[in-house]
Amino acid sequence: MSTLHGRGQVTGLPRWDRCAVMGVVNVTPDSFSDGGQWFDTELAVKHGLDLVTAGADLVDVGGESTRPGSARVDEAEELRRVIPVVRELAAAGVVISVDTMRAAVAERAVEAGARLVNDVSGGAADPAMVPLVAAAGVPFVVMHWRGQSIDMNNRAVYADVVGEVVAELRTRLEQAVAGGIAPERIVVDPGLGFAKDAGHDLTLLAHLSALRELGRPLLVAASRKRFLGRVLAGADGAPPPARERDAATAAVSAIAAREGAWAVRVHEVRASADAVRVARAIEAAENPAGAL
């Protein structure tokens, strides 16, 4: 049976007939994946527009690195980085997601035109986040998270990673709904790489159907992450640089799309945009009568 009808739609966002592609714009000097390449506002805006040209359906703008071991930036600096980029891209008609754990940044970004708040803490880092998102009436990504990046590797301890991630996400989802966010505006994300080692990430990808049982659209964010480096490591055990993991990322995008993910979040868009379209064509071939 086609996974299309299990993919879900998100109230407040466009309806895509396939797995959507979320392009990433890191307005940071220390991202693990692109090393500050888009730290300048003008370059970040151009990059966001280029991602759309390459096939991104929406663009996720973030001003705070969440790579393992990274320290947080202060609110003023995050606002300085993010808001001008959100404003210009939104003005150009791009569907914008803001990647932030701060309610104040989310509020300003929504005012500037962001249509989705992507909080890697799922509302846990800032108690004002859920009320803000509820009042703003915008969609919200609830990611599985066990603590700040500075020490999250120490929290990667599971007896049953799939069961525990699903249970912890369900709790966070229930808290978001209790806080006033409409269920139909919530997306869930298993948080690959966040308080997880390579084995945990691969196991979660092998059991995406368990995550879909939460009943909400699923965002899969595997792009260039450490577990892919581990999979692609050479005979000496050295992983390839992050930018050399895009083909592997596209492979995950195809798998996620076939497993019914609502969207994939990627740095290099073209290959994943092609991958999700191929997955959609296979779905249509499996179930021609329900293809459209």
Image (cartoon, rainbow, N blue to C red):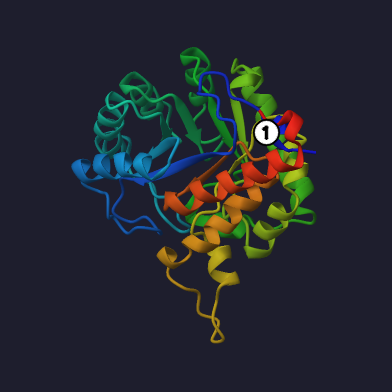
Q: Residue at x 60, y 70 (%)?
A: 231
Q: Residue furthest bottom?
A: 236
Disc 1 marks a residue whose amino acid type is Arg
Q: Pinpoint residue 237: horizontal percent, then vertical percent.
A: 55, 81
Q: Pinpoint residue 75: horizontal percent, then vertical percent.
A: 32, 35
Q: Based on the displayed image, in which of its 4 quarters is residue 1 positioned? A: top right
4 or 83: nearer the eye? 4
In this figure, which residue is indicated by the disc labeled 1? 7
Q: Is residue 203 left or right of residue 50?
A: right
Residue 149 position (above or below residue 46)? below
Q: Pinpoint residue 117: horizontal percent, then vertical percent.
A: 47, 29
- The quarter in which the C terminus is drawn is top right
Q: Pinpoint residue 109: horizontal percent, then vertical percent.
A: 35, 26
Q: Is residue 46 left or right of residue 151?
A: left
70 or 279: nearer the eye? 279
Residue 110 position (above or below residue 172)? above
23 or 286: nearer the eye? 286
Tell me if I can see residue 101 in this picture: yes
Q: Total number of numbered labels? A: 1
198 or 147: nearer the eye? 198
Q: Is residue 158 left or right of residue 80?
A: right
Tell me if I can see residue 62 in this picture: no
Residue 116 position (above or below residue 136)? below
Q: Is residue 240 left or right of residue 31?
A: right
Q: Based on the displayed image, in which of its 4 quarters is residue 289 positioned? A: top right
Q: Residue at x 76, y 43 (%)?
A: 209
Q: Residues within 10 Å of mark 1 (few under 14, many from 20)?
A: many
Q: Secondary structure at mark 1?
A: helix
Q: Based on the displayed image, in which of its 4 quarters is residue 178 positioned? A: top right
Q: Residue at x 31, y 22 (%)?
A: 112
Q: Residue at x 47, y 60 (%)?
A: 246
